Each structure stands twice: as C-alpha cells, then as structure tokens.
Image (cartoon, rainbow, N blue to C red):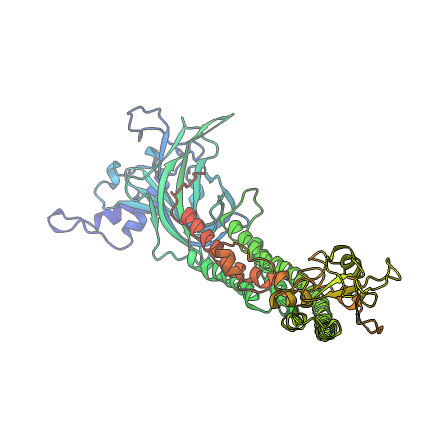
Amino acid sequence: MVPSSLRSTMASTIGHHGAIVKPQGLNRELEKQIVDKILGEGYDKRIRPSGINNKTGQNDGPAVVRVNTLIRSISKIDDVTMEYSVQLSLRQEWTDERLAFNKMALYKNYNINSITLTEQERLWKPDLFFRNEKEGHFHKIIMPNVLLRINGDGAVLYSIRISLVLACPMDLKYYPLDKQNCTIEMASYGYLEDDLKFIWKEKNPVQINQPLTLPRFTLETSRTDFCTSRTATGAYSCLRVDLIFKREFSYYLIQIYIPCCMLVIVSWVSFWLDPNAIPARVSLGVTTLLTMATQISGINASLPPVSYTKAIDVWTGVCLTFVFGALLEFALVNYASRSDAHARMQQLRQEEVLRAREQNLQQRRQMAALAAQQHQQQAASMVQHSAAHYGAPNYAQKSKAAQPNGLLLPNGAINSQSPQRAPNGTGNNAPPNQLANSTNSNQQQQYTIIGPGEHQLNGAETKQLLSSGPGANGLGAMGLPTGNFQFNGNGKGKQCEIHHSVLHSSSFGPTSSSTATPEKRVNFCRAWLNKFPTRSKRIDVISRICFPKVFALFNLIYWTVYLFREDDIIHA
C-alpha cells in the first residue's frame, strides 16, 4: 500500500517514454521513509546481527567487524609515565541484514545507495574498547564527530574521531639509542569470540596522516596483528597496531653527549696546570664535578626510575668517573708534591752537612800538608847538620842525595836494629845525643830520622809518606805509629817536633765522587720519565696520556656496542 503523499509525488515523476524523473526533495523523503521502515518496530538494537556475513557459510557464526584506522596525529611520547597521546579516526564495518533496503520493491527503481544517520543511538554497534587506554574523549566541536552510514545491502560504516592517551611500556635499556614499540589494542568488551569477531580490513588497515612529525621520535613503520586474549570469562577478539618509534639521537647528542665530553676534557686541563696552583686546580675539579652531577640529575629527572642500567647511565657514569678521577689525580699530585718538597729539604740539609764536612776536611788537608812540608824541610836541614857533625867523608854526599828522602823511625827501633856504631865506639848504642828519651810511652812516641846511609826513600815514597793521612797510605799504613816526631841533633838538645794531633785528627774521608750513587739501569719508559724531576710532574705527564687514551677506548667500545647492535623490539 503506497501512501497517498508518495503516490502523488510518484505520478509527477513519470515523464515522456516512461522515464523516471527525480524531483527535488524526493530522495530526502525516500530516505526518511527508508529509515522509518528499517528502524521500525521490527528492529531491536540490543540484538547483534546474525552471522550471514561469515565466510564459513554458517548463519549462526559470529558477527564479523572489519576495522581500519586513520592516525591523524601523535602529540607526545612521555618517557616518565610511559604513555603517548594519539588522535585517530576509528572505522568499523559490519553487515546487518535487518538494515538492507535495496531489495524492497518500492525503492528498487530509485538510485539510493546509502543513508546517513545522525542518531547513532538507534543502531546496534560493536562494544569495542581500547585495552591500553588511560584517558580518552570524543570530539564534539562543533557537532559530534560521528559518521553512521547504512548501505542498501545492510552494510554499516561507523566512523568516529577520538583522542586517546595510551600506555606504552618502554624498554629503556638502550636509551637514547633505542626503538620503542607503542601499541593500539582494540578488543570486544562483552562479546565472546564466538559471538563477535574483529578482523582487519583487507586494504589499508592502518593509514597515517602525512606528514606526521614528532619532536624526539620518528615513526619508522606500523604493522597490524591479532591479540586475542583468553581470560577466566572466555576468549575475546582483539586487534593490535604496532607503531615502531625510533628516538631522534641528534637531540641527545647535542644536549647530553657533547656537553659530557666537553666536561671530561675540561677536567683534563688541570693536568697542564702547575702542581703548586692548588686553588686553580681545586676550583676546576670541583666545578666540573658539580656540573657533571647536575647534568646527570637533569637526565634522570626526564626518565622513570627503572631497575636496570640504561645506555645513558653507562655514559654519564663513566664521564663522572673520569671527572672524579681527575680530581683524585690532583690529590695524588698534591701529596707527591709535598713529599718531593720534603725530600728536597732533606737533600739540601744533607748537602749542607756534606759541604761543611768537605770544607773541614779540606782545611785539615791543607794544615797537614803545610805541617808535612815544614817537617820535611826541618828533617832535611837536620840531616845536613848530622852529616856535618859526624864528619863522615862519604856521608855528607849520601845525605845530600837523600835529604828529601829521610825516614822517621822510633828511637827504640834504631837502638835495637841498627848495626852501625858511632865513631866513639859505644857499641850498638847510638850516641847519647841521638837517643830520644821516651817520657810517656802511652801519651807520646818520639821518632828519629835515619840517615841516608842506613835507609833511603825515593821521591814518590817520601811524598806518599809525608802527604798521606793515617787512614790511607800514611805512616799508619806503613806500619809506623802516629806519635810525636822528634829529631835529636848533635847532643846540644835541639829538637824538632811535629805533634801528631794535626795528622791524627785530620781524617781523610771519602771524596765527593765516592758519595755519588751508581747509575741505575732503567728501561726506556723509566728513562723518559726521569726527564721530569719530580714525582708530581711525572703523575701529570702520565695522566695526560692515560686519561685520553682510556676515554677514547671507552668511546670505541660504547659506540660499537650500542650503535651496531641488532634491533630487539619487544612486543607488548
């Protein structure tokens, strides 16, 4: 039964040759009638569609919902809260045979392919929800951003624009050289998999609005997958979108890595400062250490507290160790400098003592040499006097030849060993005026010069005898006691004495050459280090070489491990 209002309208649409003409307002009227027809009393939105759209051919199969999404924008990715914000258009398509109108005889001849509804509450819709959603809202400015379209065969398109804050569990082991997998998980909240099943649309299941720019990340790729979950209440259909984000390293290179390198290098400047520049080196070390600590605090403030070690932790920890090591190196240099100063003071004191001793020995040597020279002159004159006194014709000639070579012996030795007799025939005893009476054998020993007829010494022996001290090649070394020297003349009581105190007290100690330590055998490195006079300077020189080399080795290992690694994106 055709309504009267529609009957008059249809009559005016038949033109010449039976052609159908569509007057204005006809489609709108037809759409209203179609909506009233399909959403009449026979439609119940509480009942899901049947499974006639199931590919298995079973009418009682689950209702299949094809899903695709358009990612409009991603505003931020927060490392601390491990979440990201996304705005997307979610599109769901399913077939509800109760809404098909293309087979109705009344509307078959009219070109009405689809009907758009504004009242979405009148239709059954899938109970899709986002499993990893933290916050979300629909967009209602100026009108609710919802599209609900019904095709003639009963296919329904439901599209809605929403903004979501989704959880994104992150693995920060390689931060900031990492890649993160952030997901969008959509599942049925109440319908089991036997009643409702979500599948991805065959063509372009995920579309991304270009250009999609992020301040610290780059969206490398996206992929779709299924995430059907099984719980105590049953199995639920689920879809998942994996968004692979790569962190932009240039930002962290400028903000973290280069400043840390500069701080480490600045801390090495103290190695070139004078060890005595204590205020400058302390200020430099403490300043770089505090700056490095502040840098680390700022980095940790932008990251969540995790139980594992991150790549940035390794970098900042090693840089902080180098800066702290430079400060400890100064403490060691300061200690070595003080030790070197103390050693120099001790050496100066020893040199002063040795210098004073050497001067004392030199003075004693000069006094001994002067006394020996005077004694030699007196001995020579006494030999001439003795020769003249005895009047031996050949004695004077021998004594003249042996004047500088006279020898002093104790009087007792002359009395007991000399076989010669005096001209006055006193037997083995020497003349009385030649005998030296020993008044005190314990305190003083007298010596008599033996004439040239009895013993002769050459010039070298005489020089050695008179100029050498008792401790070396002097009289004591020749077996002669170092007592008082006395020559008894021709009985007139003239005596010449050289007290042994001068010779005895002048100890001819070791020369300065004997105090020099022998040269040590050293290798090349030690010989090179010996160019630097103090230990503090050597420590600085070693630090200038070792610190940069060790830091360069650390950089080589660090970048090799973290840059040339295999990607191991963990799927949530």
> In front: 474, or 414?
414
x and y, in percent, of residue 245 in the image = 41, 49
**Residue, far right:** 439
Q: Out of 196 and 278, give the one closest to the viewer.
A: 278
Classify 453 as above or below 570.
below
Q: Which percent across, then down, holds residue 339?
A: 67, 61
> Percent from the top left, x then y, of residue 85?
47, 51
Q: Is residue 529 left or right of residue 481?
A: left
> Residue 232 at x, y = what percent?
52, 25
Q: Residue at x 72, y 58 (%)?
A: 476
Instruction: Reply above or below: 465 against 570.
Output: below
Residue 419, can we see it? yes
The residue closer to the viewer here, 366 or 426, is 426
- Note whether 278 is above or below 560 in the view shown: below
Which quadrant of the rendered structure holds the N terminus? top left
Q: Is 422 on the left or on the right of 58, as rendered?
A: right
- The quadrant in which residue 502 appears is bottom right
Quadrant where the C terminus sits is top left
**Residue positioned most to the left:** 17
Q: How many marks?
A: 0
Is residue 137 among the parts visible in the rendering?
Answer: no
Residue 34 lies in quadrant: top left
